[in-house]
Image: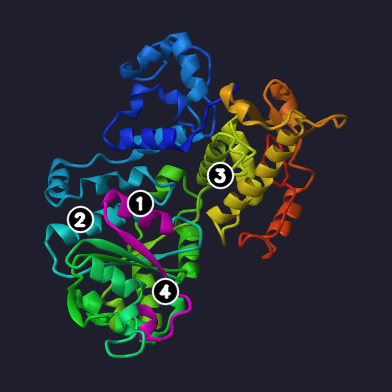
C-alpha cells in the first residue's frame, strides 16, 4: 500500500486535540489503526468486518482509499492510544473546570509513551489543587535521558496556559547561583533567572523546571527548603516578599536510572504494550524515594509531592518518535524557497511509502536507551536529511522563487532493491515519479541505508563529537528477515 500523506505536524496536533476533546476513534475503522505500525489496507471491508456501526461509512471504497492515503503513523498511534485511555469522569471534569485547569485532562493524548507518568502527574496535581493546598507542588521526574521528561513538562505548562522557565542546575554550587546576590551586595539588582521569574509571577500559577538537579550542591538544595515548603520567598533585588505558593516545581534528574531499568526488565519488558501501562509501580516509587533521600537528604526529599519514573520506549514507541521527527523535517522542507533568507531547499513534500516499516527500521538501527529520542532525532535530522539533500541536488534546474508558484516538489522515502545485488534492499529518498517498488515477496533479505551496517552505524553515532547527539554518520543499515534489526 502506498501512503503519500502530507505528514504535517500541525495536522497531527489537530487529530490529538480532537481525540482529547472526546472524539471517538471508532468512527474510523479500527482495522486501519489498531496495528498502528502497519499501513492501512486499501481493500474494501464489509459491514461484518469493518468495525462498529459508527465506522460503516468507510466501507465505500473511495472513502477508504482516501483515508488510507492520509492516515499516517502518528495519526494511527494517536487513535490507538485514545482507544486505550480511560475516559475522564464527570466529577473530575467539574473539579478541573472549577480551578481553570480543564486542559490538563488532555495531557495523556499529547505525549508518546509514558502513560503512567502522564496519569500520575494529572491525578496528583489535580488532587493538590482541588484541596486548595497553600504550598507549591513539587515533582521529581526521573529516568534515562531523552524519554519525555522535558516534553511532559512543556505540555503541562502549555495545557495549563501558564508561563514556564527551564533552569540548568548542572553548574550551580552556591545559593546565589540559583537566586542571585542578596539585597545590598554587588549585582543584587540583577537578580537571577529563578528570582526574577518568581517575582514576575507573584501569587500566580507558574512552572519552574530544574534540569540536571542531581548535579547541583547540597547548598542549593538547602536554599530551596523554605520556598518548597511554604511558597515564601523574598525578591533579592528589592527585598520584597513574594507569594510562590501556587508555583509548580519539577526536579529533573537521572537519579535512580538503575532502579528504573531493573524494574522495567523484571516487571514490564516481557509484557505486551497495553499491559505495561497497568503494572503497579508503587514499590519502584518507594525505592526511588529512598535513593533520593540518600542523595538529597530527608528534609528536601520530604518536600517532593510526587516521584514520577520514566521508562524506556517500547520498540513501537521508538518508531512513533522517529516519525515525529520525520514530520518536523517535512514541515521544514515544505516552507517556501526564500533566496534572501538563504532558504534554497523548500517547497517540497517528503512522503513515505510504508511509514511504519521505515520508522521501525530507523528505530532499530539508531535508538540508544541512554539517549532515547535524541538518538532518533540525530538519525532523521542528519542521515535522512542528507539523503534528501543529495536527491534535491540531483535536479539541475536552477533554484528560483518561481518554483513556489507551482506544485510541491515531491520526494518519497521508500524501501527499494539495490541494483545488481539480488536479495539486498535499501532505504532511499527519491523524487516522486522515479520510485521503484519491489514486490512484497522481494522485500525479504538485507536492508541497508547508505551502505553502513547497523553495528557500524551505531558505532559511528556513539561518538560524542557531533552536534551533541553523537558522531557524524553517512547512514545506517539493518539486516533482517522481514526487516528485523541485526
Q: Secondary structure at mark 3?
A: helix
Q: Which residue is mark 4?
A: 213
Magenta residues?
Answer: 149-178
Figure colour scheme: rainbow
Q: Indicate which disc, 1 or 2, sits on the residue closer to the N terminus.
A: 2
* Residue under the point 36% across and 79% down: 178
Q: Quadrant of residue 400?
A: top right
For marks 1 and 3 on the same chain, the one whose residue lies earlier in the sequence: 1
Element type at mark 2: helix
* Quadrant assignment, res 81: top left
Q: Earlier in the sequence, mark 2 or mark 4?
A: 2
Which residue position is annotated with label 2?
126
Residue 397 location, x and y as percent? 74, 28
Name the secondary structure under disc 4. helix
Q: Is residue 458 visible?
A: yes
> How far, Cα to Cα, is label 1 from label 4?
20 Å
Q: Is residue 197 above or below residue 121?
A: below
In the image, residue 162 lies in the stretch drawn in magenta: yes
Few, some or many residues within 10 Å of mark 4 (<14, 14–19, 20+): many
> Few, some or many C-alpha atoms within 10 Å of disc 2 (few <14, some 14-19, many ≥20)?
many
Give the CA distance from mark 3 to mark 2. 32 Å
In which quadrant of the rendered image does the N terminus lie? top right
| Mark 1 and mark 2: Cα distance apart in space | 15 Å
C-alpha span from label 4 to label 3: 28 Å
Q: Is residue 369 left or right of residue 228?
A: right
Q: Nearer the viewer, residue 8 or 377?
A: 8
Q: Residues within 10 Å of mark 3 (few under 14, many from 20)?
A: many
Of the numbered discs 4 and 3, the one sitting upstream in the chain is 4
- For the residue pair 238 and 234, the one nearer the viewer reads as 238
Q: Earlier in the sequence, mark 3 or mark 2?
A: 2
Q: Which residue is mark 1?
A: 155
What number is the disc on residue 322? 3
Amino acid at each position: 500500500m502506498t501512503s503519500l500523506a502530507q505528514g504535517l505536524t500541525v495536522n497531527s496536533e489537530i487529530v490529538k486535540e480532537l481525540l482529547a476533546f472526546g472524539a471517538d476513534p471508532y468512527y474510523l475503522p479500527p482495522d486501519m489503526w489498531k496495528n498502528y505500525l502497519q499501513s492501512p489496507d486499501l481493500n474494501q471491508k464489509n459491514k461484518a468486518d469493518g468495525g462498529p456501526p459508527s465506522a460503516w461509512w468507510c466501507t465505500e471504497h473511495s472513502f477508504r482509499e482516501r483515508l488510507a492515503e492520509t492516515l499516517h503513523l502518528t495519526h494511527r498511534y494517536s487513535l490507538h492510544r485514545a482507544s486505550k485511555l480511560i475516559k475522564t469522569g464527570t466529577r473530575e471534569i467539574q473539579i478541573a473546570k472549577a480551578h481553570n485547569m480543564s486542559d490538563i485532562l488532555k495531557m495523556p493524548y499529547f505525549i508518546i509513551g509514558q502513560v503512567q507518568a502522564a496519569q500520575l502527574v494529572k491525578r496528583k496535581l489535580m488532587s493538590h489543587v482541588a484541596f486548595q493546598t497553600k504550598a507549591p507542588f513539587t515533582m521529581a521526574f526521573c529516568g534515562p535521558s531523552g524519554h519525555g521528561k522535558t516534553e511532559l513538562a512543556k505540555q503541562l505548562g502549555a495545557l495549563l496556559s501558564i508561563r514556564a522557565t527551564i533552569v540548568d542546575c548542572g553548574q550551580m554550587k552556591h545559593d546565589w547561583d540559583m537566586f542571585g546576590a542578596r539585597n545590598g551586595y554587588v549585582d543584587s539588582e540583577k537578580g537571577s533567572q529563578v528570582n526574577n521569574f518568581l517575582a514576575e509571577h507573584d501569587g500566580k500559577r507558574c512552572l519552574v523546571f530544574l534540569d540536571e538537579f542531581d548535579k547541583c550542591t547540597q547548598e542549593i538544595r538547602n536554599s530551596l527548603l523554605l520556598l518548597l515548603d511554604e511558597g515564601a520567598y523574598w525578591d533579592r533585588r528589592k527585598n520584597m516578599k513574594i507569594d510562590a505558593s501556587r508555583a509548580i516545581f519539577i526536579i529533573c534528574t537521572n537519579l535512580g536510572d538503575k532502579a528504573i531499568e531493573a524494574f522495567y526488565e523484571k516487571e514490564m519488558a516481557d509484557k505486551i504494550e497495553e499491559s505495561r501501562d497497568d503494572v503497579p509501580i508503587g514499590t519502584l516509587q518507594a525505592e526511588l524515594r529512598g535513593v533520593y533521600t540518600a542523595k538529597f537528604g530527608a528534609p528536601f526529599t520530604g518536600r517532593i509531592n510526587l516521584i514520577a519514573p520514566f521508562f524506556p520506549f517500547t520498540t513501537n514507541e521508538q518508531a512513533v518518535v522517529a516519525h515525529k521527527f520525520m514530520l518536523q523535517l517535512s514541515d521544514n522542507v515544505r516552507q517556501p524557497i526564500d533566496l534572501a533568507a538563504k532558504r534554497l531547499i523548500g517547497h517540497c513534500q517528503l512522503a513515505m511509502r510504508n511509514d511504519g516499516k521505515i520508522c521501525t527500521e530507523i528505530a532499530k538501527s539508531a535508538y540508544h536507551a541512554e539517549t532515547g529520542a535524541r538518538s532518533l532525532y540525530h538519525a532523521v535530522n542528519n542521515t535522512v536529511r542528507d539523503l534528501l539533500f543529495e536527491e534535491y541536488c540531483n535536479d539541475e534546474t536552477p533554484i528560483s522563487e518561481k518554483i513556489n508558484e507551482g506544485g510541491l516538489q515531491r520526494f518519497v522515502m521508500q524501501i527499494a532493491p539495490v541494483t545488481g545485488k539480488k536479495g539486498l534492499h535499501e532505504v532511499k529518498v527519491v523524487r516522486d515519479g522515479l520510485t521503484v517498488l519491489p514486490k512484497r515477496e522481494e522485500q525479504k533479505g538485507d536492508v541497508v541505508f547508505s551502505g553502513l551496517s547497523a553495528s557500524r552505524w551505531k558505532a559511528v553515532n556513539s561518538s560524542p563529537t557531533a552536534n551533541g547527539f553523537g558522531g557524524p554518520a553517512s547512514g545506517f543499515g539493518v539486516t533482517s528477515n522481514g526487516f528485523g534489526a541485526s
